[in-house]
């Protein structure tokens, strides 16, 4: 059991307009991701979608969110800039962010990374072998050397991101490509985890290993109780009053 407060965000568009995808995720991708977290002991999980007022990400919701997970694809451009700015500010304040699959091209991820975040892709239902390359990392907790997904979309390098702070997983695909599938970043006080699998036509988010990675990622990205600093010299008492006497010659 954990008291970490999670908001699972999904654009929730494919599932409404594509019959094949609705069959895989009848209640939406977000419902399956939320269920996976509950199986891993998260009791405080809510969902939010694009079509809700303020995309379900009001100031009040974000104030009560320790970690936000993000799935988007066809509707990246429909996400309002004001909401992106709000999420960005919360990440810098310390809210964790888990960016999933095609979220690599979301406005929020690109804003946090500062690069194009583009990659190479192919839809051929290939199996995916995901290697753990940082076995001591908390997000790899409980895994063996690798795990496999029977069918996924291929993402290949080069992935145009800044060098990750930690590289946890690398994927291999039968077509020969490899991809940095599990990457972490720090921005301000916030921790960000990008996790690759999750193409909408495959039942990836039901997979126990994928659910475990997301649960581990949420635990890792949750805020900690580090010191709060004030910056500048106006109200910053530490800047105005030195901790040690200064002798000016
Ligand atoms: Zn995809």
Image (cartoon, rainbow, N blue to C red):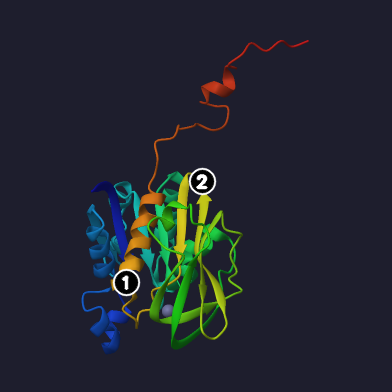
- Quick check: which quadrant has ligand 1? bottom left
The answer to whether residue 86 shows anywhere in this view is no
Q: Would you call the spot at circle 2 few (<14 residues within 10 Å), some (14-19), or many (20 or more)?
A: few
Report whether the residue tagged 2 is closer than 8 Å to ligand 1. no
For the point 23% across and 60% down, which residue is it? 39
**Residue at image coords 38%, 74%:** 198
Is residue 55 shown left or right of residue 133?
Answer: left
Nearer to me, 79 or 36: 36
Vertical arrangement, residue 14 with respect to residue 190, above or below: below
Q: Position of residue 32 (x, y in %)?
A: 25, 69
Secondary structure found at label 1: helix
User: Which residue does the numbered mark 1 point to in the structure image?
Assistant: 205
Residue at the limit of the structure toward the front, as seen here: 144
Sequence-first disc among 2 and 1: 2
Q: Are marks 2 and 1 in contact (CB under 8 Å)?
A: no
* Left or right of residue 124, residue 15 in this image: left
Q: Nearer the viewer, mark 2 or mark 1?
A: 1
Across and down, in percent, residue 120 comes to 56, 80
Distance, label 2 to label 1, CA atoms, is: 29 Å
Neighbour tally class for label 1: few under 14, some 14-19, many 20 plus, Cα within 10 Å? many
In the rendered image, the vertical position of residue 23 relative to residue 69, given as above or below: below
Q: Secondary structure at mark 2?
A: loop
In the picture shown, does residue 20 fall above or below 211? below
Q: Mark number for residue 48?
A: none
Would the CB of label 1 be found within 8 Å of ligand 1? no
Residue 66 locus on image (x, y percent): 34, 48
Circle 2 sits on which residue? 188
Q: Quadrant of the C terminus?
A: top right
Q: Residue at x 40, y 61 (%)?
A: 143
In which image quadrant can residue 241 be found? top right
Q: Position of residue 169 (x, y in %)?
A: 50, 64
Q: Residue at x 52, y 64 (%)?
A: 110
């Amino acid at each position: 059991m954990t008291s970490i407060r999670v908001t699972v965000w999904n654009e929730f568009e494919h599932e409404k307009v594509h019959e094949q995808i609705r069959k895989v995720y009848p209640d939406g991708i977000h419902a399956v991701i939320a269920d996976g977290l509950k199986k891993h002991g998260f009791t405080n999980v809510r969902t939010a979608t694009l079509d809700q007022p303020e995309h379900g990400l009001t100031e009040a919701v974000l104030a009560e969110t320790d970690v936000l997970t993000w799935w988007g694809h066809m509707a990246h451009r429909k996400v309002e800039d004001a909401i992106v700015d709000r999420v960005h500010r919360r990440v810098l304040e310390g809210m964790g962010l888990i960016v999933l699959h095609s979220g690599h091209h979301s406005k929020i991820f690109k804003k946090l990374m500062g690069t194009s975040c583009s990659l190479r892709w192919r839809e051929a239902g290939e199996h995916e072998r995901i290697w753990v390359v940082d076995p001591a990392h908390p997000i790899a907790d409980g895994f063996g050397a690798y795990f496999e997904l029977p069918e996924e979309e291929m993402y290949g390098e080069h992935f145009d991101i800044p060098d990750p702070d930690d590289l946890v997983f690398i994927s291999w695909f039968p077509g020969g490509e490899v991809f940095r599938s599990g990457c972490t970043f720090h921005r301000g006080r916030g921790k960000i985890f990008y996790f690759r699998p999750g193409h909408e036509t495959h039942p990836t988010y039901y997979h126990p290993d994928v659910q475990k990675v997301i649960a581990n990622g949420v635990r890792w990205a949750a805020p900690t109780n580090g010191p709060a600093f004030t910056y500048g010299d106006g109200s910053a008492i530490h800047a105005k009053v030195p901790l040690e006497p200064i002798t000016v010659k």
